Image (cartoon, rainbow, N blue to C red):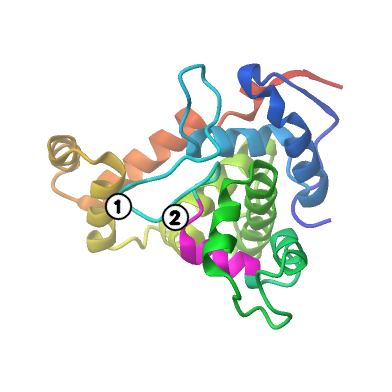
Amino acid sequence: RRGPAPAPTEALALGPNGIYAPALAAAAAQSGLSAGAIAALIDAEAAKTSDGRWDPKSDNPASTARGLAQFLEGTWLDQAAHPARSLHRRAREAGLIAEDGSVLDRAALLALRDTPDLAILAAAEMAADNLLALARLGYAPVDDQAAARLAYLAHHEGLAGAHAHLTGATTAARAARRLTANLADEGRVAQLVAAHGGAHHEAYAAWLEGYIEARIEPDRFRSVVN
């Protein structure tokens, strides 16, 4: 289907998130991404309950991001309007959008971000299309881990932001905004910028790459690969 060739059949090691194994498997089959890669993306985005379970109602008080995949309102509405998306079909069946993609019930449509299987599937489908777009720009992943990290970069930054990062074209103004939004600690921001000679774009690039390297490890969610 869309995206990279599917990984071999996976036995996932999800701990308390084993309840999401069917949704991850379905998203992998639909998108072509591995279930481990999708699990890594969700794990990096979702808030955790006290027992380590991904919280379907995760939200970010500093933005409109919500759900397991932390979709912004605008991004979710864009995905819902896309006729090839599973979200579009589900929303049409529920009478939340019209055939032409216009929204009939905005609140109910946005509330679907709290539906775990749909949030996981929407994230995987968007990631697969982002990977194809980046491949056309010359950034084709060489293996599953690279695909997972590139997919997460595009999920976190948006496709245009991911391309700007890869080409070193992120502006200082955007980098400053992103540092503040992601670190939420003026002291940490100041220290990181100072460590990179006052260059906000270099500081943000270093933080982002370090975060992705530390968090996006598909093999952490696999017990056996057949």
Left or right of residue 208: residue 147: right
Vertical placement of residue 158 versus 11, above or below: below
Residue 133: tell me if it is visible.
Answer: yes
Residue 166 percent across, percent down from the top left: 46, 55
Q: Circle 1: is it few (<14), some (14-19), or many (20+) Cα within 10 Å?
A: some
Residue 78 included in the magenta stretch of the image: yes
Q: Residue 178 shows which numbered tag?
A: 1
Q: Which amino acid type is shown beneath numbered disc 2?
A: Glu
Q: Say few, some or many: other residues with alpha carbon within 10 Å of mark 2 (under 14 / 14 to 19 / 20 or more).
A: some
**Most frequent secondary structure within the magenta stretch:** helix
Residue at 42%, 44% (x, y): give it: 59
Q: Earlier in the sequence, mark 2 or mark 1?
A: 2
Residue stretch in magenta: 71-80
Taking depth in this image into account, of 1 and 13 the one nearest to the observer is 13
Q: Position of residue 39 (x, y in %)?
A: 64, 34
For mark 2, what is the residue? 157
Q: Position of residue 15 (x, y in %)?
A: 64, 16
Q: Quadrant of residue 69?
A: top right
Disc 2 to disc 1: CB gap under 8 Å: yes
Q: Residue at x 33, y 40 (%)?
A: 206
Residue 86 is marked as none
Work out which quarter of the rendered image holds the C terminus and state it: top right
Question: In the rendered image, which quarter contains the N terminus?
Answer: bottom right
- Amino acid type shown at disc 1: Arg
Q: Vertically, is 28 above or below 84?
A: above
The reply, left or right, for residue 58 in relation to residue 56 is: left
Asked whether residue 24 is drawn in magenta, I would say: no
**Would you say 150 lies left or right of 169 here?**
right
Q: Residue furthest bottom?
A: 100
Label 2 and label 1: CA atoms lie apart by: 9 Å
Position of 35 relative to 100 (above/below): above
| Viewer-nearest residue: 81 or 161 | 81
